[in-house]
Every structure is written in structure tokens, then in C-alpha cells.
Image: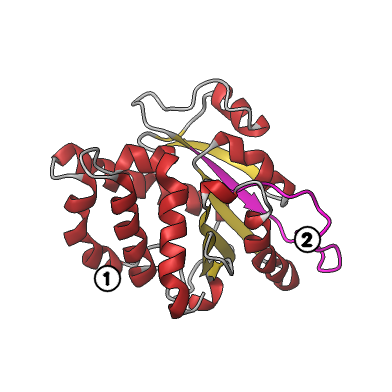
Amino acid sequence: MSRANVADGILALARAFQTDPVANYVFRPDVRLPSSLTTFYSLVLRLQCIDWSLNTVSPDGRGACLWQRDGGAGSPRRAGFTPLAQLMFAPHAPGLVGWSPRALLRLLRLGEVVDHAHARACKGRPHYYLAVLGVDPLMQGRGYATALVAPRLAQADREGVLCYLESSKAGNVPMYERWGFQVVAVCGSWEGELSDEGARAAARDGSGKGALVDAAGAPLLWIMTREPREAAAGSCAPGQRRGGSPN
């Protein structure tokens, strides 16, 4: 992603995540979600994704993915919002999620759950974090998602590095599995890691059947990791079956 096509990437992600369970759980209901998402991803790109070479927008601007590089335990290069970025994000939070203590607590709790799941899954190993992947709903199912992620997966294979993501939709799990990811945990956006076997089974087969919220009514997150493959085998070969977008 170059700074010239940032606007295209933001709009693609805003369109893609309008039906996302976590976005609809977190963002305030009295503001049009596309507007909130546009603001949110503008902030993410400004505050979080510093290495622009890891971000990709499709040539027609209909899809985008944002990666972060985490150097592992003890490394100064870590994925996620830095304390300074969190401080800069704070003034914008009420406009996105609302002013009620419950809304702000929901946003903070989600951040804690994701950070904890991220740390448990990666165990201090260096990795690439697929933070966001989205394709315009009108263009899903045409191979956009595969084309967006394939270069970074191939890079991870060459470097022998782990990849990590959180999926907010059970139906996307099979697509990620085709790329070599595996479910390692299921988390509630509010409660943290779950032990509910029904939710885990739904995550494994991607059917979406069974419980899709935790006991607090918050959407689930499927925590997935991908071990590096031999470079010669490739990650997403051109002839491999392609899936749609996560959103």
C-alpha cells in the first residue's frame, strides 16, 4: 500500500466490515456504521500500521489487507497498538463507541481479550499478524482475498515465520484453513477464552452452527495460526482453490 491509495483501502474496509459481528457489537448504534468504520480504519492506518510495505490494496481499490510484523518476545517491534498510539486513539473512542461507561468498557475489554489471545497463541515467537482483511461485498468470491494475502504468506514461508489472525466469522474459517491456518482457540469478545465444546466444534468446521456468542452476548473470535511451509511448496499457489473475503 502506498499513501496514494490509502483512501481506496479505507473505503474497501469500511464497506467490507458493515456486517461484521464485532464491528456491530463495538461501534455505537446511533451513528451510521460505514462512517464509524471509515474513521476507525483511518485511525488504524495512522496510528498502528507503521510499515506501509506490509499493507496491500487491490489495483481496483475493492479490497485491502493490513499486516503487522511482530519480532517476538523481547523485540522492540511488536504488533498491536503501542501505549502512545492508545493515548492518541483515546480522544476518538467516544465518537466511535458512545459515551456510556458500558460502551467504553466494552471496547477496552475487547482489546484485553485480543491481546491475551494473541500472546497465548504465538508464545513469544516472531510472526506476521493479519490484522485486517476485507473485500467489497460486491466483489467477494472472485479470488480477491487470496490475491491480497498470498504474497505475505509466501514471504512468511521463505523466512520460516509463523502467521496469526483472529476471525470474527465462523464461515470464514474454512477459507483460512485452505491457506494453512488452524484454529487454536475460541474467544468471546467480552469473556475471553472459552471452553465451550460446541463453539469450538463450530469453529473447526466453519458451519456457523451452535453458539456464536459468549455468555455475555458478545460475538466470538476464532484464533488461528499458520506454521510456515517449505518455500518450494508455496502458500497460495495460483491454481489453489480460492475463497471469498472474510467480510
What's the residue at 29%, 59% (across, down)?
39
- In the rendered structure, the answer to whether residue 105 lies left or right of residue 208 reads left
* Residue type for callout 1: Leu
What's the residue at 33%, 37% (across, down)?
25
Measured from the top left, where is residue 247 in percent x and y?
52, 46
Closer to us: 11 or 109: 11
* Residue type for callout 2: Arg
Spatial separation of the CA atoms under disc 2 and disc 1: 35 Å
What numbered label is drawn on residue 8?
none
Of helix, strand and loop, which one carries label 2? Answer: loop
What's the residue at 55%, 56% (across, down)?
123
Q: Is residue 236 magenta?
A: yes
- Residue 185's place in the image compared with 211, above or below, is below
What numbered label is drawn on residue 84?
1
Measured from the top left, where is residue 155 in percent x and y?
69, 71
- In the rendered structure, the answer to whether residue 104 lies left or right of residue 224 reads left
- Residue extending farthest right: 232
For residue 71, say whether it is visible: no
The part of the chain drawn in magenta is 221-245
